[in-house]
Image (cartoon, rainbow, N blue to C red):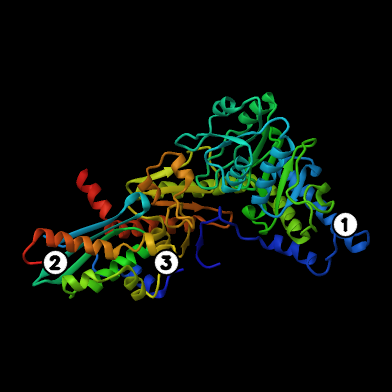
Amino acid sequence: MNGIYLDNMATTQCRPEIFDAMLPWFMEHFGNPLSLHKLGQEALVAVENARSQVAALVNSAPDEIIFTGTGTESCNFAVKGLAQAYAKKGRHLVISAIEHHAVFNPVKYLEKNGYEVTEVPVDASGLVDPEDVAGAIRPDTVLVSVMLANNEIGTIQPVAEIGAITRQRGVLLHADGCAAVGNIPVDVAALGVDALSLSGHKFNGPKGAGALYLKKGTRITPLIHGGVQEQGRRAGADNVPAIVGLGKAAELAAAGMSERVSRITAMRNRLVRGILDNIDEVYYNGHAEARLPGHVNVAVNFVEGEALLLLLMHEGIMASSGSTCTSKALKASHVLSAIGLPEQVCQGSLQLTLGAGNTIAEMDKVIEALPRVVSRLRAMSPLYKKSAAKA
Amino acid sequence: MYTDKVMEHFMNPRNVGEIENPDGVGEEGNPSCGDVMQIHIKVEGGIITDCKFKTFGCGSAIAVSSMVTEMAKGKTLDEALQISRDQIADELGGLPPRKMHCSNLGADALRKAIEDYRQKHPVAG
């Protein structure tokens, strides 16, 4: 790959071992796991092996893993499927203010269909206060959904503390783990969640492969009705190559976890230090410690994110932003608003998300290039001069 | 996403800066929306002899600013008032549809600069 890829929250590069593991399942072993003949049975073994690999990554039993098409599907499935299956108990949901659209929008859909929703706020570092969740739970609450780690600012939520509350109050808990699983150790038993969404392409697996952990004994209404695949909870012929790839990605993620976390954390700390030391008026967003190892979110005041990204691209650096202009919906990030970042500052948002493939030398290249790019844009910015005059 | 012309103006913007003692100043946009464009003009004998910009904004906002300053220079005030958003976008080889409204503030900022000049120079204008 040419250039420095720092957009690992958007997607990661599929590792060659994972790609190789998938290949035989396209042509040579193309069977349907539901078929009784040899080709079918081979595929069934491969799918069940992948299920065990994913289960091992999150410390669940294999039959608690349901394969889906994407992380978004898993989140939709958990939110709508649990709310519907337990609708007799009540129609109230609790979510955090910084959920991904994969949770936010299904919740909005339910709201239009007779459910009520309470949104709990986050503090300036993006943390949910478990006490706020406890305070939001009502007798008719069926589900709490809080993301394990936020994809935009990297903050890791106190899900285990929230899980203790939901268990005690008899309410289901879904954690959107798409940004977290594969990047930090995740243990569904320790977290006390009833459901956890994950996505393969966030940890070097293929796109089009997700899964939902669903605690044994939990009822769920399917999103997709049809055949008996996935114990009748997710119909449609299994995407065997993608499932095999997801399984392999889970195995590799689990194997190298602690070494990778410490190596990526060290790179991240170097990058953050370099940015904060060399650029003034930069906001470092998210929690200082409770954050994903490879996640850097800064907001550079007086410049706009898309212009930053274009100039960084010219330097061979690929990143992302939560500014209004970079969003297809032309709306600044709801996460940055929720942590109380002023609107103008949100426009200078820059996300640099590291992966296993990055190097220290790449961090140093960014530390060298970014101040130069920022100076260039600030020299053009009418706001920078005004602010300097004020000071 | 952007035409080569937009990228060329973004990477090498013309007429960046401010004019000392400008004859007219125009500003358009809103920091919370991500675009603020400031245009300074120098006017001699009813003709815009110099035009400079400072812009806080995305790639297209900067390219539009650069282009509008080039288009305005050498024009009479009345001619410059005729410069439209569409003309600027056309000169840049087109802008993405969603950028046509929010980042295409050059014509408005220029008009404000001309109005500012005329207010300060009621006879000459």
Residue position marked by numbered label 1 in the rendering: A34
Q: Considering only vertical position in the picture, is B44 above or below A221?
A: below
Q: Nearer the viewer, residue A227 or A347?
A: A227
**Between marks 2 and 3, how big is the CA–CA gap?**
34 Å
Mark toward the start of the polypeptide (3 vs 1): 1
Q: How many marks?
A: 3
Residues at circles 2 and 3 in contact by the CB criterion of under 8 Å: no
Residue A107: give x, y in percent of width and height: 61, 42
Kind of residue sitting beneath label 1: Leu
Foreground disc of the pair 1, 2: 2
Instruction: Please give the chain letter of the residue carrying mark 2.
Output: B
Label 1 environment density (alpha carbons within 10 Å; few <14, some 14–19, many ≥20)? some
Q: Quadrant of the C terminus of chain B?
A: bottom left
Residues at circles 3 and 1 in contact by the CB criterion of under 8 Å: no
**Between marks 3 and 1, how big is the CA–CA gap?**
50 Å
Q: Quadrant of residue B123?
A: bottom left
Name the secondary structure under disc 1. loop
Instruction: Please give the chain letter of the residue carrying mark 3.
Output: A
Foreground disc of the pair 3, 1: 1
Residue B67 visible from this viewpoint:
yes
Kind of residue sitting beneath label 3: His
Residue A61: give x, y in percent of width and height: 79, 40
Residue B17 visible from this viewpoint:
no
**Between marks 1 and 2, how big is the CA–CA gap?**
78 Å
Residue position marked by numbered label 2 in the rendering: B42
Residue A154: give x, y in percent of width and height: 53, 44
Residue position marked by numbered label 3 in the rendering: A314
Name the secondary structure under disc 3. helix
